[in-house]
Image (cartoon, grey):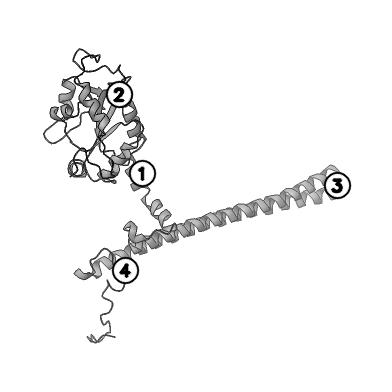
Amino acid sequence: TMSPTQSTWGVSTVDKMSKRSREEVSEVSSVKRTKNGLPEGEDPEYPVRVYADGVYDLFHIGHMQQLEQCKKLFKYTHLVVGVSSDYDTHRLKGRTVMNEAERANSVRHCRWVDEVIPNAPWCLTPEFLKEHNIAYVAHDAIPYTAPGQEDIYQWIKDAGQFLETQRTEGISTTDLILRIVRDYDDFVRRNLARGVKREDMNVSYVKAQTLKVEANVSKFKEQVGKRVDKVKAEVKGTVDKITDKIQSLDEEPVGKSFDDSVNKFRDNIRVKFDDLKEHLKDWEDKSTELIGKFTEKYERGVHKVEQFLRQRFVRSPVDMSPDRDFLSANTLPLARDSSSNGSSNGV
């Protein structure tokens, strides 16, 4: 486990200058302080040391805006950010996407952050605040529970050293993960199209093939739609030309008999055009219905195949490696003799 002054990216996260200012600010009596003895942040030489902590997984704009609030709490602020370890986070909150080194390095590159403490404690103690000369702790005011505690920040609030920040609505690590989970198939399809191997995404052979077929069906539907629109446009253009021609004839009548013929011809064209539109719409509807039924039957068939394979075939321990294809010949006992006489001789 890393100590607070160690870093896996090769740069000390607690530099010498911040350490010196931490030691000096507690000794200098000329620093303007509040009634409880904490600095007011009016002296650029001795900024107020504000501490914020968190997991900071998938470091996003919500994190950045929270750290910006912390930095702007005083005129002169030295913002110290604690990043929890993988061990504590996985044990107390759940699995992360990024490891602790990646999370700490992401925070370190935020413009509002002056100092990063990796492997920060999940629950703060007076000793920790004293060691790092922390004047205030900044966090949103929602009670944060832990085993045996209703709010891990309560004692800091009671001591008058807690400063409230606001959460950014609509964005959180949980929200980002939910978006990925919700659109999982779309992301897998995109990556397959980009050449990413299904094994690298932990996607089964059947699932990968299903997504490829769905992608081809969607592409076919799009092509059918474009073709229908093109035919509609061509028919409409032809009918418009004929209609214009008929209207020009109407403007120069040459007799009742001719007018009757023109009107009959016009009505005939309109009927045929209406029929053509109905045929086009019927063709479009039937194409969509056909594609939908095909997709539904294909998915049902894939599901049945998957169920059959899971029930019928049991892999031996040597075939349980995640690198082996579930549907490869090596994982299925297809080499057994399947003749009707029950002979044990192999082919």
Q: Amino acid at mark 4?
A: Leu
Rendered view: 288 above or below 95? below
Instruction: Name which of mark 4 and mark 1 comes first in the sequence.
Output: 1
Residue 319 versus residue 139: which sits nearer the camera?
Answer: 139
Is 47 placed left or right of 213 in the picture? left
Q: Nearer the viewer, mark 4 or mark 3?
A: 4
Look at mark 2 in the image and give the residue it sits on. 77
Residue extending farthest left: 148
Report if the CB atoms under discs 3 and 2 are less than 8 Å apart.
no
The quadrant of the image that shows the N terminus is top left
Q: Is residue 234 above or below residue 172?
A: below
Ranked by sequence position, the earlier of labels 4 and 3 is 3
Q: CA distance from mark 3 to mark 2?
A: 95 Å
Q: Which mark is residue 256?
A: 3
Asked if labels 1 and 4 touch by Cβ distance under 8 angstroms, the answer is no
Task: Tell me the quarter of the picture where residue 191 sits.
Answer: bottom left
* SS at mark 3 in the image: helix
Residue under label 4: 327
Upstream in sequence: badge 4 or badge 2: 2
Q: From the viewer's perspective, is 59 left or right of 229? A: left
Residue at 33% from the left image edge and 43% from the top image edge: 178
Q: Position of residue 283 (x, y in %)?
A: 56, 57
Local SS, label 4: loop
| Alpha-carbon span between mark 4 and mark 1 | 30 Å
Which of the marked residues, 1 or 2, is nearer the chain's N terminus?
2
Q: Determine which residue is flagged by label 1.
A: 179
Percent across and percent down for residue 193 are 44, 57
**Mark 3 or 1: the one toward you:** 1
x then y, percent, for residue 135? 21, 23
